[in-house]
Image: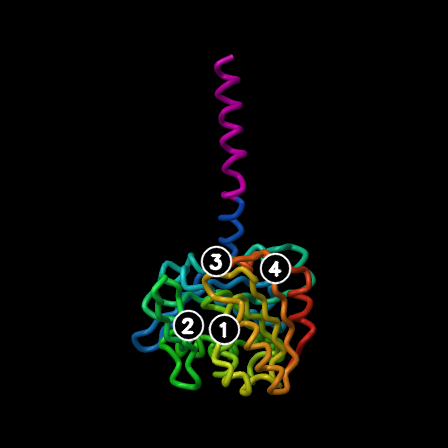
Amino acid sequence: MRAIKLFLRGMLGLCLAFPFLSQAQNLSSFDRGSYIIKSDTIPYRILFPQNFDPTKKYALILVLHGAGERGNNNEAQLAYGPKLFLNDTIRAKYPAIVVYPQCPANSYWSNVKIETNATGKLIFNFVEGGEPTRAMSALLGLVSQLLDKPYIDKHRVYVGGLSMGGMGTFEILRRDPGVFAAAFAICGGDNTRNAKVYAKKVPLWVFHGAKDDVVPVDHSIVMVEAIKAAGGDPKLTIYPNDNHNSWDDAFADPGLIPWLFSHKK
């Protein structure tokens, strides 16, 4: 009887641990890499298509994480979104190379000045023009390096991100709009005057939570309005009950990947 109890207890522990083990095994499918330029380093994780053939060409999807995942452990940036890209059906129907770069802890994807008001609320002052941050400069270098690979389809390069990464998405579009076939920005923002640089060049899908108390939804709304005013035709999805974690619903949207792949340069 004691042996049976011990066996059952062990099986229960295995069952409880299995989801975490499964997730760890899935995330291990993302290979580790790093891009180094002078004194700056951008660690990244990269997922190759199933049955990868280096003689073929594949779409490239760049995913930019939020401020909470900054660092140099080359792991934290995989906190949100990988489940979508690891989905067997998605990988089979939309083979792509997916890259998750990690922003250093002392930098930011976007050129934005962040202040705190009297109530402790963050205020984002997005810069018009200006020099890119060190992280963005290194990121642009990484993208250039990836585009040199013979197996990257330069007509199908996509970028998207959440929170700081959503801001970084707007930022990289104006830094290098000719590269990207389509983009998605989740709970991000930018200076509306920057929209004219990429409004007509890059199809964009913007997501935000109506109840976002970290990055107000107005930041996405005004960007969509500015892009339309500059001649673009962006999509906007606002989740009425979502707070800052609107990325959960955005990454779960069954139309996101098909929409990206519907665009080519």
Q: Residue furthest left?
A: 39
- The residue carrying mark 1 is 189
Q: Secondary structure at mark 3?
A: helix
Is any part of residue 151 visible from this angle?
no
Residue 17 magenta-highlighted: yes
Q: Could you tell me the amino acid type at mark 1?
A: Gly
Numbered range of the magenta stretch: 1-21
> Are the residues flagged by discs 4 and 1 in contact, CB closer than 8 Å?
no
**Vertical order, 54 against 196 (above or below):** above
Query: Where residue 193 appears, x then y in whole percent?
Result: 50, 85
Q: CA distance from mark 4 to mark 3?
A: 26 Å
- Where residue 197 sits, quadrant-wise, is bottom right
Q: Could you tell me the amino acid type at mark 4?
A: Pro
- Residue 124 is labelled as 2
In front: 185, or 6? 185
> Are the residues flagged by discs 2 and 4 in contact, CB closer than 8 Å?
no
